[in-house]
Image (tube, rainbow, N blue to C red):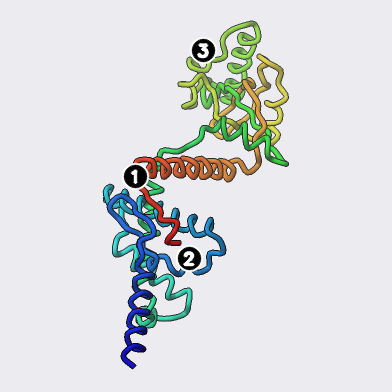
Amino acid sequence: MKRVLLFLLIFNIESVFAENTIIAIVNNSAITYNSIESMLINANSIEHKVSIVNQKIDSILQLKKAKELKIEASINDVNLTMLSIAKKNNISMNQLRSYPEFPLLETEVSEKISILNLQRYITKDITITENEAINICSKEASNSIKQIKIAQIIISEVEAQNDQDAAIKAFLTKLSKHISKGASFESFAKLHSQHSSYLNGGVTDWIEVDNPIIMMLDSLMVNEVSKIYLTDFGFAIGIKLDERFVANNLNQCKEKLIYLNAEEFYSNWVKSLREQAYIKIYHDAL
């Protein structure tokens, strides 16, 4: 009987020892078998197990950096997330807290929020210019939208004794003739336009070609002055400066490109954390 008890005692000690076997070292932190046992059990190859260990190593490095930068998950953020989990599962917070796995779930939530905060912090300056987005997105788009950039001289009122509209049109006609003979549209816009765009020589942002007036302006030849047309700010004449075709989902495509750039940047940044760290994986323990 004593020998049986001794055998059982030794077996239990060995089981506990196996569960707490150190399988990796990350700087001053140790990763034990027990800490990632639930994931290792489902691994079907040594390569898969090593991949799981590497994920844990990356997590430890990121959490340490989040702590250094003081951007760890707040108690409030964790509580709100736990409340959301409870609601999605149609249970109360008290019921959720009663589960044995609650402490592990709470820790997991805290770590994920901390890493998300770190990702946002590290990639906060990642962006892409509009021209880059247009060049990439328009090539990939099955449908595109035509946009033009124009310059306008807009007049809302002039000194006139009789018909104000007729006087404005006469003045714009006079300007149009001078421009057609070689005068600078930009200079005339800065001097005469009564719209805030005069500061920029009357130049507009990119405008989608989607209404009769813009279509008329789009049809202009280079340096050709348009006929007089009515805007929300007064009568105007304009010239066409440039055109382009953009993806009809440009904003969504641009956001996707920023996300992909940020993802790649962050992945490389995590690799740099690994390069600066002391990492040792005990493959025999897996």
Secondary structure at numbered mark 3: helix
Residue found at x 40% / y 51%: 58
- Residue 3: x, y in percent? 34, 88
In this view of the protein, can residue 221 be seen by the observer?
yes
- On residue 277, which mark appears? 1
Would you say the residues marked 2 and 3 are in contact, meaning their CB atoms lie under 8 Å apart? no
Task: Tell me: 231 left or right of 195.
Answer: right
Residue 266 is drawn in which quadrant?
A: top left
Distance of label 1 from label 2 (alpha carbons): 24 Å
- Residue 124: x, y in percent? 40, 42
- The residue wearing badge 3 is 187
What is the crowding at mark 2: few (fewer than 14 residues within 10 Å), some, or many (at least 20)?
many
- The residue wearing badge 2 is 40
- Name the kind of residue labelled 1 in the image: Ala
- On residue 109, which mark appears? none
Badge nearest the viewer, 2 or 3? 2
Secondary structure at numbered mark 1: loop
Compared to 44, does 69 lie above or below? above
Residue found at x 58% / y 20%: 167
- Residue 80: x, y in percent? 36, 67
- Name the kind of residue labelled 3 in the image: Ser
Task: Tell me: 263 left or right of 122.
Answer: right
Distance of label 3 from label 1 (alpha carbons): 61 Å
